[in-house]
Image: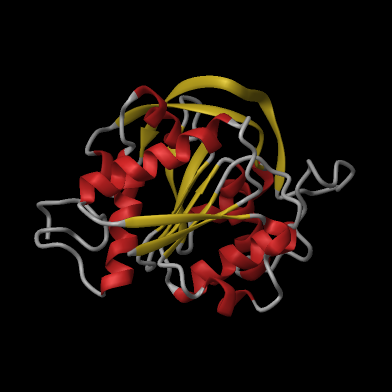
């Protein structure tokens, strides 16, 4: 059994939370694996986060922030990043993955999220110029990135429910280093990032899980589940590329 931790504060009225189990179920069927997922309310995350999350093969930081326990969510992301556990962050998960990285790697002192600290003078996560609430748009995938290889196309259409993203003041930091941009919108605003040198670490401002509500299994979720299987078993199915989780490229 492959266990996946869904880090976030479950709310049955949140569309993304309705979609995530369907997306994981479809991905598990596609991969041919038995997958179990557990919703982990951030208020239950202890200070000894490594021991708490170690039983899980992968971690998904889910939408619907602010979280009840922001430090707990950040600690879970840090565990996934440092321990090499497959990580997927969508919407709020994208925002908090950037906060964690800003503090740990960019050495930003007390990186702020404008939703939590509206008066912060230089927030890492700032209000979007145009809110993306129940909005869909076409995104350009950066050639050579894991996300582009997973989808196998130059562009994808995705849906959002968010009002905050990476501040333009910090965008240039993604031009160098291991964390890099893997998707832009039509005006070259950052919509997804991934971490080089990590088995699987992808964060998207959009919510790919929503396609499961119309009967389509998101390729990104399938790749995430494949990476979880690899972690749980120590190997990938025959013919699967470890870096992308794509069949037929191994």
| Res 79 quadrant in image | bottom right
Q: Is residue 197 visible?
A: yes
Query: What is the total number of numbered labels drawn onto the structure image?
Result: 0
Residue 132 in percent (x, y) is at 61, 25
> Between residues 89 and 5, which one lies in front from this camera angle?
5
In this view, 118 is above or below 109: above
Which residue appears at 37% of the width and 60% of the height? 200
The reply, left or right, for residue 123 in relation to residue 13 is: right
In this view, 89 is above or below 209: below
In the picture as drawn, the residue positioned furthest to the right comes out as 119
Residue 22 in percent (x, y) is at 39, 37
In this view, 105 is above or below 172: below
The reply, left or right, for residue 182 in relation to residue 38 is: left
Q: Is residue 145 visible?
A: no
| Res 221 quadrant in image | top left
Residue 21 in percent (x, y) is at 44, 42
The reply, left or right, for residue 34 in relation to residue 7 is: left
Residue 247 in percent (x, y) is at 14, 51
Which residue appears at 61% of the width and 35% of the height? 12
């Amino acid at each position: 059994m492959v266990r996946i931790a869904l880090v976030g504060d479950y709310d049955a009225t949140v569309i993304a939370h309705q979609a995530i189990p369907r997306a994981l179920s479809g991905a598990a069927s596609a991969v041919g694996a038995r997958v179990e997922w557990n919703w982990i309310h951030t208020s239950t995350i202890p200070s000894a986060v490594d021991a708490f999350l170690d039983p899980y093969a992968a971690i998904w930081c889910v939408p619907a922030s602010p979280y009840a326990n922001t430090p707990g969510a950040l600690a879970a992301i840090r565990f996934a990043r440092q321990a090499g556990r497959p990580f997927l962050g969508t919407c709020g998960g994208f925002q908090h993955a950037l906060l964690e990285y800003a503090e740990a790697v960019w050495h930003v002192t007390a990186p702020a999220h404008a939703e939590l600290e509206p008066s912060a003078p230089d927030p890492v996560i700032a209000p979007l110029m145009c809110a993306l609430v129940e909005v869909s748009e076409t995104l350009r995938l950066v050639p050579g990135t894991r996300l582009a290889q997973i989808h196998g196309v130059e562009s994808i259409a995705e849906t959002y429910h968010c009002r905050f993203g990476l501040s333009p003041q910090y965008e240039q930091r993604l031009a160098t280093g291991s964390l890099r941009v893997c998707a832009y919108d039509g005006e070259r605003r950052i919509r997804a990032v991934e971490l080089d040198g990590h088995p699987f670490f992808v964060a998207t401002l959009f919510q790919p899980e929503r396609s499961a509500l119309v009967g389509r299994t998101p390729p990104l979720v399938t790749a995430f589940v494949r990476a979880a299987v690899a972690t749980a078993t120590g190997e990938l199915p025959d013919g699967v590329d470890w870096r992308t989780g794509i069949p037929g490229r191994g």
